[in-house]
Image (cartoon, coloured by chain):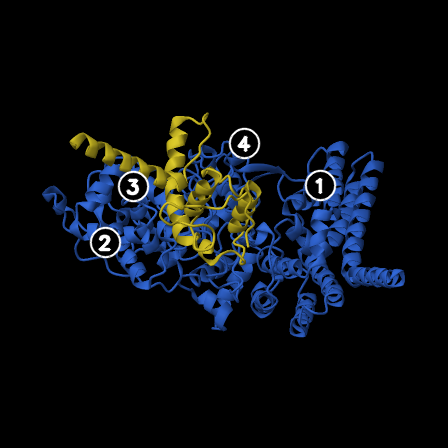
Amino acid sequence: MKKKGMIFLIIVVTISFSLKKENGYYHNFYFASIADFNKQQLVLSDKINKTNIFSPKEINDIKESIEQARLKLKAIDFWLRYLDPVAYKKINGPLPVEWENEVFEKFEKPYKRKGAGLSLAELYLNKKSINKDSLLHLINLSINEVKAFSADSITKQLDTFDHFFLCNRLYLLNLAAIYTTGFECPDSKNIIPELSSMCTGVKMIYLNYNQTFPDKPITKEYIELYDKTIDFVGRQPSDFKQFDHFTFIKEFVNPLFAINQKLIIQYDVLSKNNNDYTLNNAANSIFDKSLYTSQNTKGIYSLVNDKEALIEIKETGKKLFYDPILSGNNLRSCASCHKPTEYFTDTSFASSLQFDRKKRLKRNTPTLVNVVYNHLLMQDGKHISLQNQAKDVMTNPDEMGGNEKEIIAKVLSCKEYKAAFKKFLKLTPEEKEVTFEHIASAITYYYSDYSSYYSPFDEAMNNNKPLSEETVNGFNLFMGKAQCATCHYVPQFTGVPPPYIGSEFEVLGVPEDTAYTQLSEDKGRYKINPAIETMYAFRTGTIRNIEHTKPYMHNGVFNSLNQVIDFYDSGGGEGKKMKVDNQTLSPDSLRLSPFEKKELISFIHSLNENIIFEQAPEQLPISSHKELDTRKVGGVY
Amino acid sequence: MQKKYFGFVILLICVLFFRCSRHKVICNIPADYPEARRQQIIELFDKGKELYKINCSQCHGIFTKGKDKVPNFTNVQMDNYSASFLRRDPKNHAVVAQMSQQQMNEVLTFLRFKKINKQDSTHVAK
């Protein structure tokens, strides 16, 4: 009996040891890589400590040391960015202070995050007077933060294969969206060398992973293509302005992404991380419109699956969209400003008339096409859901001037609407009566359909359709020299960076008029989240369809794309010699040639989606109140 | 004669009322909540109850005449569930994956504020 017990014990011990060993390669590699990086950081901090005079020679010396540490960091970026994005901001944060506007803010207020680490240290070295302690502080914070990645809560994720494919997905998305653009990289001459070092570093991670998890390997097909990717990056010129972003994404990153997505489904990978919140495992291309979801377009009808009912909801939504019954004076509809035949915007005015028909609104009407890919809505990010946004416009005294109770009563006074909503009420059994939410959700469900169309650029990426050389060059400029992609991220070209969980705001220094006499007075994000950093900040909009959505900027000050590009080319408001204290756009000129601007515009035109617009309804439902029956389709003004 | 009859009816109503209310899931809001908040919770609670009845009670609870019984979920269970809802965990119930945040909020309000069943104070989700 005792002997049996002993044998059993021995077996258990050997098995447990052998199991540990199996995980060993990957685990050991993880810890060794992190230790390697930290060692380089300690060398750096030592070097700063010994420096007493910051002469150009010493500064260069420190910069070189920073670069060495950055290269080590890039090799482990794969893990760090996914496993703990908050800690990552202290290691390689792009800004000293950032206001996080992530999805979870749908339940929490925006919160402040202080950045630290290598990028900020490098930027600090460019300042006129350098304080040693401040510089050391930035590095020490990073050294401290690296410890977080040895904590059990994080390392235990390494025990299963799940995290690997999810880390890899984020890595691939970042390869497409930010790693090649110079985001988080203060010195643009390092972008391509860093990319190259990152690609080879990640290859080592793949190999170690496959040794430890032979049952769920990253396939040979993937590794082969990845080798070609490394090869491609190696053959590219080291100047990031010459880098072929288009081929890199189309031939390499996107197909790699497709394989990784396939593996995620095949291996039934389970996510326990908020980074995967919005991503769709079934999307096989980065340029698939179902890549991520950020808005619930169905609202109160979320649980409705009946196709016929959904069509009916959409039809009712369409009528309501054109119906001025939703406004206080029955003269204005959603379509008054968001003209459905003009890409759901108004191209004739910088900003639309106010409710009183005299003054003008402060901000330009944004298009509703592709709004569903934003997490925060309105140019100041006031709203988190489409339905709330719709309700706000209807009841805003400056816009449609309605009142919740009156709107419901007026809508239900029409026989046709009443019958429809009675039917819809049955689909939402938790509600006892028709609510404002029913009306708003029908409207959002109607117009969100127009966000699902593709552009020639998507077709080129997804289906290998040809693009002109001019357009491809334009895309490469967009991603590289013109620095557009550091804020307008692939694939929606809006301010939502991977992993697509939050919207970003930028301060550009937009002028009040085209003569640049003064800064636009609109405080933007500051009104919603008052802070020094958010003054004059606006949500980054999409580039898709912008040929058709003039005028541009929050106040509609620019009437042509040329003006907009000139504005960016000269370094925003600060570059135009206006005083902007917190501009997030570099005030230096981009030095784009007229020919390059033409190429850039050609690329922008390739983002025009092939949207099929519908005609307005011929008539509106008849109300039992006679005075309501004089209303016009789409409203009067 | 008539008086007797009247008394009998009242008695009957009382019995019926008692039988119905005995097992009805009721809202249990702490006494120190302000009235406005209380009204808000009751509204969410009623909607959540209806949603729960339709979408969840086939497996978790009973809603038949006079025998309503909904399992007591612990706060930790509900927090975890709500977190996995936010994360769109693919292992979530299919119906929950479809719900809007507002609807999920209603269901959770219902579960959080319903009066706790004394008989079985713990429920282990299958």
* Image height of A256 relative to B55, above or below: below
Give the quarter of the figure containing the C terminus of chain A: top left
Label 3, secondary structure: give it. helix
Q: Residue A595: tell me if it is visible.
A: yes
Q: CA distance from mark 1 to mark 2?
A: 62 Å
Q: Chain of mark 4?
A: A
**Which of the two discs, 4 and 2, labels the residue nearer the N terminus?**
2
**Which mark, residue A532?**
4
Q: Chain of mark 3?
A: A
Q: Amino acid at mark 4?
A: Ile
Q: Give the chain letter for yellow.
A: B
Q: CA distance from mark 4 to mark 2?
A: 49 Å
Q: Amino acid at mark 2?
A: Ala
Kindly indicate whether the residues beneath marks 1 and 4 are on one polypeptide chain: yes
Q: Give the chain letter for blue.
A: A
| Between marks 3 and 1 in the image, the one whose residue lies nearer the viewer | 3
Q: CA distance from mark 1 to mark 4?
A: 22 Å
Q: CA distance from mark 3 to mark 2?
A: 21 Å
Kindly indicate whether the residues beneath marks 3 and 2 are on one polypeptide chain: yes
Q: Residue A364: tell me if it is visible.
A: no
Q: Amino acid at mark 1?
A: Ala
Percent position of residue A422, x then y: 24, 51
Percent position of residue A444, x then y: 34, 51
Say few, some or many: other residues with alpha carbon within 10 Å of mark 4 (under 14 / 14 to 19 / 20 or more).
few
In this figure, what is the number of numbered marks? 4
Classify residue B70 as left or right of residue A257. left
**Which mark, residue A121?**
1
**Res A397 quadrant in image:** top left
